[in-house]
Image (spheres, rainbow, N blue to C red):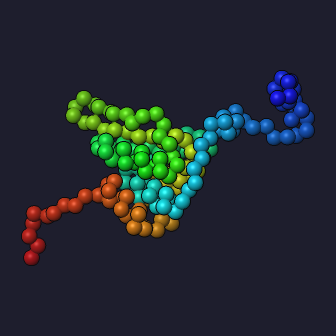
Amino acid sequence: MLNVYPTIIKRWLIYYNIPIRTRKEASHIRQSNHFTVTKQFEDWLSGEMMGDGCIQSYSDYSAKITYASKYLEYIDYISGTLDNFGIKQSGHIYKRDKGDGWIAYQYQSKRYEELKSFHSKWYCNGKKRIPSDLELTPIILRQWYIGDGNLHKSRRNIS
């Protein structure tokens, strides 16, 4: 834009004590994705996180949602719901086959700056944990049950 070498600009930034972005910061700004966080999204994601949902972050600036299930229909539901919230899928849904009859389908979203706070809330020292301030709502309970619950009828008679 100024028709000068980047090193000239950097020299003047340093001279005038103007902070310089790191390469990671600059990369994040160029590639960042954004969506609007709603209460409905927070509850939906919290319900999924109570089950098998996962948020991964390998940077200081963003995170992504990943999910694996043996049911392709459920992964399609996850993808469609997240798309409705403004979170786009990264690549395609992968089929993982270990060859011993175990098959799972895996989804992953693009990286979003807004997901970083959810990652911090749900992971402490790299371990997933239920946040102490989580208040259960009907949406959280529904998604938790759909993603991780089951009904089991006991064969024992209780007298």
Residue depicted at x 52% and y 62% = 39
Residue depicted at x 57% and y 45% = 112
x, y (%) of residue 72? 31, 41
x, y (%) of residue 56? 49, 43
Image position of 45 with respect to 137: above or below: above
x, y (%) of residue 5? 83, 23
Image position of 39 with respect to 24: above or below: below
Q: Is residue 92 left or right of residue 149?
A: right
x, y (%) of residue 74? 33, 47
Q: Nearer the viewer, residue 67 or 133?
A: 67
Q: Nearer the viewer, residue 6 or 91?
A: 91
Q: Is residue 110 left or right of residue 104?
A: right
Image position of 139 with respect to 79: above or below: below
Q: Is residue 80 left or right of residue 24?
A: left
Asked if residue 1 can be seen in this view, the reply is yes
Which quarter of the image is occupied by the C terminus? Answer: bottom left
Residue depicted at x 41% and y 63% = 139
Q: How many marks?
A: 0
**Residue furthest to the bottom:** 159
Q: Nearer the viewer, residue 78 or 155?
A: 78
Asked if residue 131 can be seen in this view, the reply is no
Which quarter of the image is occupied by the N terminus? Answer: top right
Q: Nearer the viewer, residue 76 or 58?
A: 76
